[in-house]
């Protein structure tokens, strides 16, 4: 014991001293990095502002500059923004511009070695950028960023560094004490083996320590060091630029390349027999649009219903097929359903029951016990497929959508250590609406088999937690937004879905001008015709009837558009086996015809309805060819069409008209927001869009493109995986070490 104390105390003192010495160095380094980041950010911001600013300066419009500044200054980190026309003038600035900054002393804030500016809020980063040409300055832009977060980060870093060294001291002390207690026999060999690193290797096959007594110690040590390593590397999701590469890095770093399995009803590639040939089709589905780029990035296994007429002819003996065709990067495992299963589980319970139940679109849900029995059976079938596809006992399973409400619990029963992330792509209604479902408890209990349950908006999370509170004996914690059922915890979280960014070359490769000319020509329209576009599955929740009524109202209120404006609606056929969808299609066709008869005599028609499947590339060509895109869902989870239109417009033109009842409305406030039930308002929005000046289109489009680029689909799944990684780490720490296992 005395030996241990003699060794342990000085060691702890030395490590504490190192910790004190290292902390300021880490501080300086992080400050330098963050300042450099801010320099880059200021440069980018200036480049984005240069053109609009020059326009406002040329028209000498102070009020426009002020309005433009207050829009730009909504950015969280941008503290203040100002403009000096000359060194003698007074700065034109947002209110927070610190009094120390004047037009006559801007020189102090130029150059590489400039200091940060002190303020009561914390340090401020000041960047002064010249506008106009080098020899002919049109003034100076002053951008001030809030750097107070650096202080906060630095405090956190210091604490982590200190705890890290303390923990290290504790571990080394513990090892020393135990070693001192062990017999002398073999200790030299044991220490040598540890020093050689054999006991600290990650590969279990290489994890051999020659002396048996050391094995448990080495394993504990290894475990602790790994946890500390990953803890210190744990990413702050808001600091990552999300891309396929960062997603791959997370999978390897945070999740150590764990098994990833996706389960959905719809498959990403459908093989159809067309005569003697086999054709590959990409389905019209928001869920597929979102998951496909992720699977390309992380090469997992995607389990889905094999629904194509040639699907069975294209799989191997294990029902697998590598996709995308021609450039395979992941595997699809197809699950086969009988016609009875498909009719009861998919058309019946999922789409005649849950779909209308969760959307407020005034279509009554239909619940049949025979459909429910098929729904249970098909969920069981997919649970078995998940077990057979998982290479380990603790895969990460991403369960997609309302077709699989029971699957999370079924997987949990078979693979208790799996991390199950379930994402509900459609809205969740309020408890009163949900309670009409005869199998409401089973559905909620099924979903609560998930480790994480995700929705697009906080509103849907709240509705779900309220529903659990009302209908189940479960413990709901509104502070951490978790639900505990039978001792198992589910985190209910908001993850707004998005699309891949940047869009692929295949989608945006064709120049806008060419798209404009071809789309007009192919639809028999004059080259000068103005075009609006709508792209949807022919679903009654998408508000296609309301959209057409808005076009009718526009032409009634502003007859000057008759013959000059055409709205093209792409309506991908969907769920055609359900009566409600057949009725809806008939109504949509009839309404389009009536409006065309009313306003289309002798002139180009006001509405062109194209009820057929289009490939994604063609859909993007329509986006690029149009003056406006109208998304008028009556109730939607997110609506990816809105984000796709924004992504397609790299020319920064075009206007998005967006229903306030979509999830996207919360992220794209620069769109023209409408209540689709209000035909007058929607008609007025169409007129506004058709007459919007190009500079305003550009300002709005730039802001929306900025948001979609940052909040892209890699971020959507990356944040779920990071949360899952943290849960797994916590779980490992709480687990008892398995001695000798
Ligand atoms: C659900 C939720 C949520 C459309 N026509 C064709 C076609 N599309 C593509 C679009 C877009 C996708 O389908 C539709 O996405 P949405 O998000 O608008 O809608 P849902 O399919 O209802 O999706 C929705 C989504 O899940 C994701 O979570 O946003 O709220 O209801 O990508 O471009 N694609 C092809 N041909 C077409 O004719 N290939």
Image: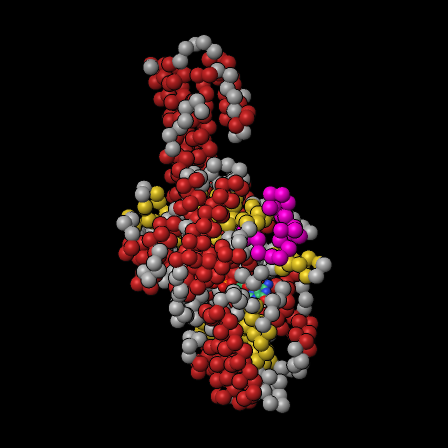
**What is the quadrant of residue 565 in the picture?**
bottom right
- Seen from the viewer's position, the closer of residues 179 and 656 is 656
User: Residue 554: where, in percent of width, then height?
Assistant: 50, 84
Residue 138 magenta-highlighted = no
**Relative height, residue 615 to residue 294 (above, below):** below
User: Residue 333: where, in percent of width, then height?
Assistant: 57, 47
- Seen from the viewer's position, the closer of residues 68 and 291 is 291
User: Residue 243: where, in percent of width, then height?
Assistant: 56, 52
Q: Which range is magenta? A: 304-325
Q: Residue furthest top?
A: 185
- On screen, residue 426 versus residue 466, left or right, reads right
Q: Residue at x 67, y 68 (%)?
A: 511
**Relative height, residue 55 to residue 416 (above, below):** below
Quadrant, the C terminus = top left
- Seen from the viewer's position, the closer of residues 224 and 597 is 597
Is residue 202 visible in the rendered image? The answer is yes
- Seen from the viewer's position, the closer of residues 605 and 414 is 414
- On screen, residue 431 versus residue 103, left or right, reads left
Residue 312 magenta-highlighted = yes
Q: Residue at x 45, y 47 (%)?
A: 380
- On screen, residue 688 versus residue 440, left or right, reads right
């Amino acid at each position: 014991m005395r030996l241990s104390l003699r060794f342990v105390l000085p060691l702890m003192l030395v490590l504490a001293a190192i910790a004190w010495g290292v902390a300021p160095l880490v501080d300086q380094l992080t400050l330098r990095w963050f300042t450099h980041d801010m320099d880059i950010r200021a440069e980018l911001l200036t480049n984005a502002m240069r053109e609009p600013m020059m326009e406002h300066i040329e028209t000498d419009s102070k009020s426009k500059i002020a309005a433009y500044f207050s829009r730009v200054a909504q950015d969280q980190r941008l503290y203040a923004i100002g403009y000096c026309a000359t060194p003698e003038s007074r700065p034109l600035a947002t209110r927070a511009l610190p009094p120390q900054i004047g037009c006559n002393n801007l020189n102090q804030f130029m150059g590489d070695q400039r200091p940060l500016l002190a303020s009561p809020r914390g340090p401020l980063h000041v960047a002064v950028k010249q506008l106009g040409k080098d020899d002919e300055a049109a003034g100076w832009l002053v951008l001030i960023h809030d750097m107070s977060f650096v202080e906060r980060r630095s405090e956190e870093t210091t604490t982590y560094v200190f705890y890290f060294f303390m923990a290290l001291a504790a571990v080394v002390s513990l090892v020393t004490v135990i070693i001192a207690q062990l017999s002398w026999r073999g200790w030299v060999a044991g220490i040598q083996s540890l020093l050689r690193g054999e006991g600290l290797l990650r590969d279990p096959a290489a994890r051999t320590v020659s002396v048996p007594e050391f094995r448990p110690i080495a394993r504990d040590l290894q475990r602790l060091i790994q946890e500390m390593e990953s803890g210190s590397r744990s990413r702050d999701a808001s600091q990552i630029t999300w891309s396929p590469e960062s997603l791959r890095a997370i999978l390897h770093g945070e999740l150590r390349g764990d098994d990833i399995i996706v389960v959905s009803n719809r498959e990403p590639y459908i093989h159809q027999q067309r005569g003697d040939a086999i054709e590959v089709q990409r389905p019209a589905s928001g869920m597929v649009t979102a998951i496909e780029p992720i699977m390309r990035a992380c090469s997992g296994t995607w389990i889905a219903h094999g629904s194509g007429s040639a699907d069975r002819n294209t799989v191997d003996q294990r029902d697998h097929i590598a996709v995308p065709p021609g450039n395979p990067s992941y595997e699809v495992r197809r699950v086969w359903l009988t016609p009875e299963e498909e009719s009861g589980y998919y058309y019946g319970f999922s789409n005649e029951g849950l779909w209308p139940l969760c959307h407020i679109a005034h279509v009554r849900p239909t619940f049949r016990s025979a459909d429910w029995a098929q729904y249970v059976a098909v969920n069981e079938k997919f649970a078995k497929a998940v077990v057979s596809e998982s290479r380990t006992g603790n895969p990460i399973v991403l369960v997609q959508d309302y077709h699989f409400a029971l699957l999370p619990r079924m997987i949990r029963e078979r693979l208790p250590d799996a991390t199950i992330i379930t994402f509900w792509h459609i809205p969740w209604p309020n408890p009163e609406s949900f309670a009409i479902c005869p199998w409401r408890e089973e559905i909620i209990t099924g979903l609560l088999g998930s480790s994480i349950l995700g929705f697009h908006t906080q509103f849907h999370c709240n509705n779900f937690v309220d529903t659990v509170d009302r209908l189940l004996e479960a413990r709901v914690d509104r502070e951490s937004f978790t639900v505990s059922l039978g001792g198992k915890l589910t985190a209910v979280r908001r993850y707004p879905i998005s699309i891949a960014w940047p869009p692929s070359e295949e989608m945006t490769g064709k120049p806008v001008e060419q798209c404009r000319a071809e789309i007009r020509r192919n639809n028999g329209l004059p080259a000068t015709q103005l075009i609006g576009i709508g792209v949807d599955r022919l679903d009654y929740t998408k508000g296609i009837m309301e959209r057409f009524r808005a076009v009718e109202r526009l032409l009634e209120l502003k007859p000057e558009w008759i013959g000059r404006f055409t709205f093209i609606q792409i309506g991908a056929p969907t769920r055609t086996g359900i009566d409600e969808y057949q009725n809806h299609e008939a109504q949509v066709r009839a309404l389009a015809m009536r409006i065309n008869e009313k306003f289309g005599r002798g002139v180009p028609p006001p509405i062109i309805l194209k009820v057929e499947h289009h490939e994604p590339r063609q859909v993007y060509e329509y986006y690029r060819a149009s003056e406006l895109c109208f998304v008028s869902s009556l109730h939607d989870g997110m609506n990816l069409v809105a984000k796709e239109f924004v992504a397609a417009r790299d020319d920064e033109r075009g206007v998005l008209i967006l229903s306030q009842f979509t999830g996207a409305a919360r992220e794209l406030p620069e769109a023209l927001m409408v209540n689709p039930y209000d035909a007058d308002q929607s008609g007025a929005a169409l007129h506004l869009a058709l007459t919007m000046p190009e500079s305003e289109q550009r300002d709005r489009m730039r802001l929306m493109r900025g948001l979609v680029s940052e909040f892209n689909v890699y971020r959507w799944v990356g944040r779920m995986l990071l949360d899952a990684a943290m849960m797994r780490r916590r779980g490992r720490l709480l687990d008892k070490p398995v001695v000798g296992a």
